[in-house]
Amino acid sequence: MKRLFALIAFIAILTVGFGPKAIAAPGDTTVVEKVAEVKEVKEAVTSNDSAEEAKEESLHQTIKEKFIEGGAFFMSFVLICLILGLALIIERVLYLNLADTNTDKLLVKVEDALETGGIEAAKEVCRSSRGPVASIFYQGLDRADHGADVVEKTVISYGSVQMGMLERGLTWISLFISLAPMLGFMGTVIGMIGAFDSIQAAGDINPSLVAGGIKVALITTVSGLIVAMILQVFYNYIVAKVDNIVNNMEDASISLIDLVLKHSKK
């Protein structure tokens, strides 16, 4: 019996010492307090995530409401300009990134091929390389037997062809840049006409009638200007990329003519 009472007393001491209502020593935190702190952190993270989701939903909802308020007819045309313009921009960016090659390495390979295997080996190097510079090199080397003058004319002519391929689609992007704000201004004018029609029908200048029409009119203008600015940034990037590739083409073409002259003298 004494052993049984001792065991019961020991279990009671453990229960009281480590129970949820245990009193901590000075400077320590209890298990309950730690659990409460963890819960508070989790609740704070959950509340932050909920706030961010609410912001995203509110932004999406605001854009949707402004699109409807601006008038689905004109806003749809502005949206089409944005979609088509971005599609052309993505196609051009991918094409130009693939067309932009290291011309210095290509020149070294062509020169080595001319030294070791002649014109045919150099042409094979150009065939296995991508980009407009390699195509220009191939056309020039293909006519290397006709002399340096023919090679120069061929390089210039085919360089113009490659330059046209690099600039393909830029006129359409420029069209959408100009068309988007024009559509926005047209929506503005039509919205103002609707506001004046409301004034005429009411027979009095009521601020609420005018404010509604002006707000709808200005939404289309803002949308058109935003689309134009987005497309203009990418358009300038593409133009700069094309200029860089064309400059590399011209420099590499001059070096190719020098290599052909050097090889023909041997």
Image (cartoon, rainbow, N blue to C red):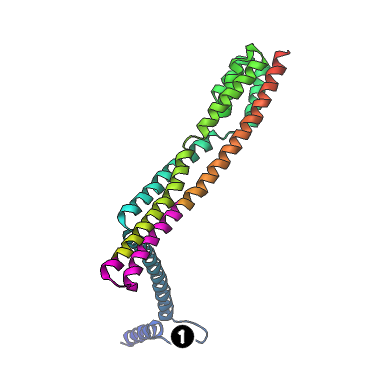
212 or 64: nearer the viewer: 212
Q: Quadrant of the C terminus?
A: top right
**Residue 153 lies in the magenta stretch:** no
Tell how many labels.
Answer: 1
Q: Is residue 221 magenta?
A: yes
Examine the residues drawn in magenta and state their main secondary structure.
Answer: helix
User: Dot 1 lies on which element?
Assistant: loop
Q: Position of residue 238 (x, y in %)?
A: 53, 42
Q: Is residue 139 found left or right of 86 in the rendered image?
A: right
Q: What percent of the width, then of the height, locates residue 93? A: 50, 40
Q: Residue at x 42, y 79 (%)?
A: 31
Residue visible at 64% across and 25% down?
109
Question: Which span of residues is magenta-colored?
Answer: 198-227
Query: Is 260 rendered above or below residue 47?
Result: above
Q: Nearer the viewer, residue 193 or 47?
A: 193
Residue 65 in picture, x, y percent from top left = 33, 62
Residue 247 placement, left or right of 179: right
Kind of residue at badge 1: Ala
Q: Residue at x 46, y 37 (%)?
A: 169
Query: Foreground residue, 227 or 126?
Result: 227
Q: In which quadrant of the rendered view does residue 113 lie?
A: top right
x, y percentage for residue 189?
Answer: 37, 57
Task: Give the residue number, with chain letter if any, for mark 1.
Answer: 24
